[in-house]
């Protein structure tokens, strides 16, 4: 399975937050699964840290490498799909991750109920 972690899922994973369910933990740790983190997540974390809305690791690339997570860059193809998405969700970070999941055939792991309104696979 190829997964894309939503920002809150990644942060819960990195901080070992108990909000992350055992099922989610098992899926992330399954060695048969590829786990991706979007460049949009790094961007969202940086923006929210800058304005004081979030505390997160300073060295995200090292944290991703330590967990064997793969970086998913934002491609022009991902951006081109944005204007075709319905406006169920207005958050630009989530919208680009939805587009990435569609383009790359990824399962988006999220607790965001608005994302379920899109035609993508979620956990």
Image (cartoon, rainbow, N blue to C red):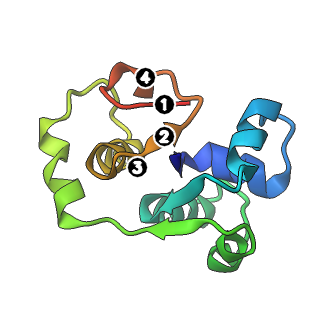
Percent x, y of residue 81: 16, 47
Q: Earlier in the sequence, mark 1 or mark 3?
A: 3
- Specify the quadrant of the image occupied by residue 61: bottom right
Q: Tag 2's secondary structure?
A: strand
Element under disc 4 = helix
Of the numbered discs 4 and 1, the one sitting upstream in the chain is: 4
Q: Which residue is mark 4?
A: 116
What residue is shown with label 1? 122
Tag 2 and tag 4, C-beta contact below 8 Å: no
Could you tell which of marks 2 and 4 lies nearer the N-terminus? 2
Secondary structure under tag 1 reads loop
- Which quadrant does the C terminus fall into? top right
Residue 21 appearing in the image: no
Choose between 34 and 102: the one closer to the eye: 34
**Towards the viewer: 109 or 33:** 33
Q: Are marks 2 and 1 in contact (CB under 8 Å)?
A: yes
Residue 5 percent across, percent down from the top left: 56, 48
Q: Residues within 10 Å of mark 1 (few under 14, many from 20)?
A: some
Q: Nearer the viewer, mark 2 or mark 3?
A: 2
Which circle's residue, 2 or 3, is located before the other in the chain? 3
Mark 3 closeness class: few <14, some 14–19, many ≥20 residues within 10 Å: some
Q: Is residue 34 left or right of residue 54?
A: left
On the image, numbered disc 2 is attached to which residue? Answer: 108
């Amino acid at each position: 399975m190829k997964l894309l972690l939503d920002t809150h899922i990644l942060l819960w994973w990195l901080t070992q937050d108990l909000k992350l369910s055992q099922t989610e933990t098992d899926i992330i740790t399954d060695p048969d699964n590829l786990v991706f983190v979007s460049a949009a997540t790094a961007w969202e974390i940086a923006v929210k840290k800058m304005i004081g809305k979030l505390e997160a690791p300073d060295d995200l690339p090292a944290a991703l490498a330590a967990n064997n997570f793969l970086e998913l860059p934002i491609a022009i193809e991902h951006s081109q799909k944005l204007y075709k998405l319905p406006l169920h969700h207005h958050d630009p970070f989530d919208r680009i991750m939805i587009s990435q999941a569609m383009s790359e055939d990824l399962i988006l792991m999220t607790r965001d109920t608005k994302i379920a309104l899109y035609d993508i696979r979620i956990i």
